[in-house]
Amino acid sequence: MADIVVPEGLWDTKKTPEGIVANWFYADGGDVPEGATVAELMVEKSTFDIPAPGAGRLHVIVAKDGVVRPGTVIGRINRV
Amino acid sequence: MSDIVGGAASAASERCAAPSAAFFDDFKTAQLGLHRQEQLAEGISCSRPHLLLWRAPPALIVGRSDSRLPHFADAADRLVAEGWPVLIRRSGGSACPISKGTLQIALARTATTEITIDSAYTELTNLIRTVLESYGLKVETCSKSSAFCPGRYDISVNGRKIAGLSQHWRQCNGHITVTTAATMIVDQDPEAIAHIVNLFYRVAGSTERCSASAVGALRQALPVDVTFDAPLMEDACNRIAKAARAEWRNDRRRISAPNPLPHVPCHTTIDPDHGVPVSMARF
């Protein structure tokens, strides 16, 4: 099992407290290859591709348009 | 583009081939230019940034959220009829018109631990500010909410937005990279910019609007006694190259920018399934 985490320190939360999950590119419960771009975050006008930390089945924790901060676990890859 | 030797950022990689900086002026379509920009990070394997300057025929480049507006397809068709095909970009933000009167500036680098969203924005903002100030202009950096694609790093002169920035972070060749991109209005009528943005949003079903009085152009902002030896667009590109060299001359993360920038004929071909204008493919 591997957590999909918003990188710590990606943005200055004093200036922009939160971002959002702009897109999930795989369905909840779908199989994801390691390294594939599995989600996209948006912080102001910056988009950030989130790669899958391992291969397995995706479990979405924060849905599309959900609010995130650095360190938030947005999903999980469960090995099958 | 010059070849970049693969490998992690390290002392050895500082000796990797110099990244290129060039002005692409011959893109037949904005789609080709946008594709080139979005591939800019592909060749990065060490800590030096790549600088790309380009311009292209008219297009309206929108963000993914714009593509989910209720009547987006209708808006895209309408804009094609007006001569402004709609393209969806990977970086954030909202609708941004580009044309032969705007200069696209993209800076791509590997994101080492000290690189953040704000530091990458500040890097390109400072470069553009330096160029505008070299013309004797007084520059502000703050959000212009009534201009197109507003953002905290909007660059304004005389209260009018002249440049806007957006970013895309992705993993390339085992490295996290960030491409910060700017549209600088050099010689485009602000009224035309506002018209196209407002037409798109009106047809697409959004209340977003752009006020022409919030948008400026470098040509209009220049003091009357400023002179330059080349057409304004070329002069602006050469000043960007000069500012980039000065900015990174004593920095290990250096960019190699020839003086003046070479005009590079565009021989790029693209995968027809990648970045096809919305008017040609239904999403």
Image: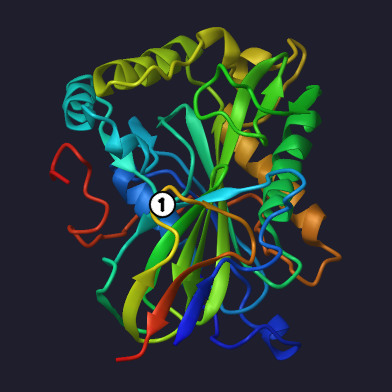
Is B51 displayed left or right of B277 in the figure?
right
User: Residue B92 at what x, y percent from top left?
Assistant: 48, 45
Is A80 displayed left or right of B214 in the figure?
left
For the question of whether residue B225 can be seen, the reply is yes
User: Residue B229 at what x, y percent from top left?
Assistant: 67, 30
Q: Is residue B155 above or below residue A21?
A: above
Instruction: Please report the residue visible at 36 percent of the width from the left and 76 percent of the height from the top.
Output: A36
The residue wearing badge 1 is B90
Q: Using the image as rendered, state which of residue A15 and residue B192 is in the foreground.
A: A15
Callout 1 crowding tier (Cα within 10 Å): few <14, some 14–19, many ≥20: many
Name which residue type carries label 1.
Answer: Arg
Q: Is residue B54 above or below residue B149?
A: below
> Label 1 lies in what chain?
B
Q: Using the image as rendered, state which of residue A73 and residue B233 is in the foreground.
A: A73
Q: Using the image as rendered, state which of residue B215 and residue B242 is in the foreground.
A: B215
User: Residue A16 at what x, y percent from top left?
Assistant: 68, 44
Is B248 displayed left or right of B241 in the figure?
right
Instruction: Please report the residue visible at 39 percent of the width from the left and 40 percent of the height from the top.
Output: B63
User: Residue A21 at what x, y percent from top left?
Assistant: 46, 54
Q: Using the image as rendered, state which of residue B215 and residue B23 is in the foreground.
A: B215
Instruction: Please report the residue visible at 34 percent of the width from the left and 75 percent of the height from the top.
Output: A58
Is A41 displayed left or right of B117 in the figure?
left
* Residue A35 placement: quadrant: bottom left
Check disc 1 and report its element: helix, strand or loop.
Answer: loop
* Residue B20 placement: quadrant: bottom right
Q: In this view, does B113 lie above or below B132?
A: below
Q: In this view, does A12 lie above or below A77?
A: above
For the question of whether residue B218 can be seen, the reply is no
Instruction: Please tell me how many numbered marks the rendered image carries.
Output: 1
Q: Which residue lies furthest to the right in this view?
A: B250
